[in-house]
Image: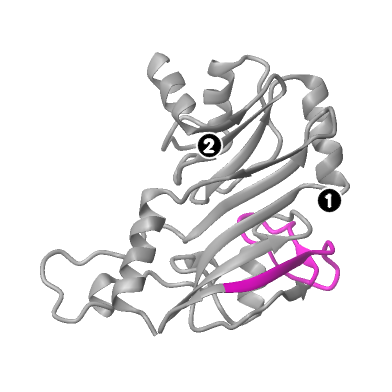
Amino acid sequence: MKNSIREFESWILYRDDDFIVVNKPPFVPSLHERGKFTHISLLEMAREFNPDATLCHRLDRETSGAVVIALNADAYRHMSIQFEDRKVEKIYHAVVEGQIHFNDHLVDLPIQTEIPGRVRIDRSGKPSATFFKALEVFRHFTLMECQPVTGRMHQIRVHLESQNTHILGDELYGGKMFLLSQLKRKHKGEDSPLIKRFALHAALIAFRKLNDEVVGVEAPYPKDMEVLLKILRKYDAV
């Protein structure tokens, strides 16, 4: 338990009496996983740190980045209202396939979330909107900023699929695993994917504290995203 608490503390980016923001690593589930165990969940770790801790939102297991955790009931209620009123600013970074020159490109398409495990665009679904902007364009990929207005399950992933692009490694929504040898000519040694998950990271979150002060927290890339971008800048530059 002490090791889990120390690990959790190493992820903390921001802390006050009401909230903690952590930089969740990839492959850590937000909640306890049924039927399998890959890692103790973020919620379980947070409650070892503080028994009153509650996640204000979730990230997919493979998605890394900023998660807000409330430390008391008033804080949780305050954040829930902000999420409901769409007052929380969230910015994600994704590496997507192809050269995609979006500049504040809005995808405003409803999403059906009732299908277990996978969502899709559907006129009878829930209203969903995401802004996309290209941050860095490579020969085969684009580093994309994704700013969801709504917070539907898999929203960024399915909205990108609707625009005929996919997050690198996101096989559920049409993405592919890309091997180092496909970029690096004369590659020697063991071949491996550029990243062993879909390349999506929650890079920033901004919200209001109980006293109405705005808090903005940036989450640095985990090692696998840093290495991925280093490889693309070296071997896939335009």
Q: Main secondary structure of the magenta part?
A: loop
Q: Amino acid at mark 1?
A: Arg
Residue carrying label 1: 86
Is disc 1 placed on a helix, strand or loop? loop
* Image quarter in which the N terminus is found: top left
Q: Which residues fall within the magenta stretch?
A: 109-134
- The earlier-in-sequence mark between 2 and 1 is 2
Please identify the quadrant where the C terminus is shown.
bottom left
Q: Residue at x 78, y 28 (%)?
A: 76
Judging depth in this view, the residue of 157 and 10 nearest the camera is 10
Q: Where 11 sits versus 137, above or below?
A: above
- Residue 56 quadrant: top right
Tag of residue 33: 2
| Percent position of residue 15, x then y | 62, 26
* In the image, farthest residue toward the front: 213
- Residue 190, label in figure: none
Please say which color scheme the image uses: one colour
Q: CA distance from mark 2 to mark 1?
A: 28 Å
